[in-house]
Amino acid sequence: MTEAARQFVTPLSLQVASQDRVYTSLFEEPMAHISLPAKADVMVVAPATANTIAKLALGIADDLLSTCFLSFQGKMIIAPSMNWKMYENRTVRKNLDTLASFGVLQVGPEAGALACGEEGTGRMAEPADILEAIRSVLTPKDLAGEKIVITAGPTREYLDPVRFISNRSSGKMGYALARAARDRGAEVTLISGPSCLKKPDGLAFVGVETASEMRKAVVEAVAGRATVLIMAAAVADFSPKTKSAKKIVKTGEMALALSTTPDIVSSVSSQAERPFIIGFAAETGRHPGRAAAKMKNKKMDMIVFNDVTEPGAGFDVDTNRVEIIDGKGRTKLGIMSKYEVADAILDRFIEIRA
Ligand code: PMT
């Protein structure tokens, strides 16, 4: 803890919260500025004030934190936090650019209410996002060189400007795949239908609404020499045959004529030069056979069978329970977080492509 940090929180509070020793001064233990960094895999400065950022950028070493930074040789993350006008200041920006050129990863800051009572960009990133950055820098980059296009979320098929047909997909599975692939070093393009989830950092993001918009975005992204396409999106199978330009007036019962939407996977799998294709099959019941048939019919290389009626699986939950089916066999997984499911799918991809 720096001297400024101790104005806000006592060392005792952090000692209790972390159940670990808290260091505050350069001289409280001989050589702590060498021995502490030597034991660490990653160094995180959160929150990082404008003053600390300047010291780190210039190599000023006048307290325990700044001396630790100079002797530390591993991965480094900073989470800036300050007033929005200070964050926009040219010197602060220059110092952040200098740290980025040293390979220091910056997380945040975010926009919102600031400690000074003003609104703006300067809030420290959420702890969950800082944790995600830590996981990302520590993950081995076994997908470096891969260009992976991932779809997520539902699509919306409009009847009129205010009404649409959609489904229960939250985007959680597709976003977890995008984060896992990014953390493992892949260049990721995430194409997402409407979702409340926060856009992940460190990847290209394309927002779409309808199945035909998603198809266009996928075809364009794959043409950018994608090596893998993962279709986790719950694409609408049907769309209203006609779309009214104005809100349809209620006059009593109404019958809706639907036509089928374009099959996105098939428009990519039919191409001569195509990426490795991983699809999902959402079923209401144990029908791995149907999933395998979908894989064959749509010419996919792998499919993830997802019985969305199982507890803790499918739509809008943080966990999933799936079976991975490919040309070499079937791998049934237990219940796990969607990020772990994503890792298992990517592991299997690496295994069968080897
Ligand atoms: O988003 P979450 O809340 O986390 O939920 C995750 C999920 C349940 C949506 C996800 O795990 C999942 O199962 N996604 C696929 C849903 C689906 O559309 O399955 P399907 O069996 O109807 O389609 C088979 C495959 O064809 C899918 O890869 C689908 O993306 C693709 N498809 C479908 C229709 C269409 N017009 N074009 C397609 O490419």
Image (cartoon, rainbow, N blue to C red):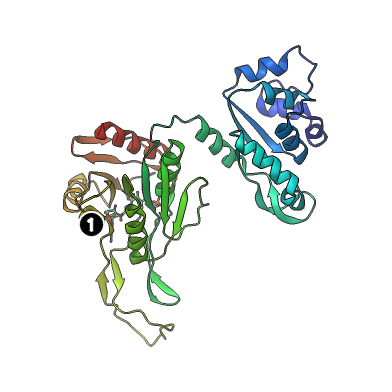
In this view, the residue in front, 213 or 247, is 213
Residue 103 shows up from this direction: yes
Cβ of mark 1 under 8 A from ligand 1? yes
**Which quadrant of the figure has residue 53?**
top right
Residue count near mark 1 (Cα–Cα under 10 Å), binned few <14, some 14–19, many ≥20: few
Say if 165 sits above or below 132 in the image. Answer: below
In this view, the residue in front, 196 or 99, is 99
Residue at 53% x, 38% y is 132
Residue at 19% x, 35% y is 329
Residue 316 shows up from this direction: no
Per the image, the residue denoted by label 1 is 266
Residue 168 location (% of width, % of height): 39, 58
Could you tell me the amino acid type at mark 1?
A: Ser
Residue 115 location (% of width, % of height): 77, 48
Residue 169 location (% of width, % of height): 39, 56
Ligand 1 picture quarter: bottom left
Say if 104 sits above or below 88 in the image. Answer: above
Question: Which quadrant does the C terminus fall into?
Answer: top left
**Which quadrant of the figure has residue 322?**
top left
Q: What SS does tag 1 mark?
A: helix
Residue at 39% x, 31% y is 142
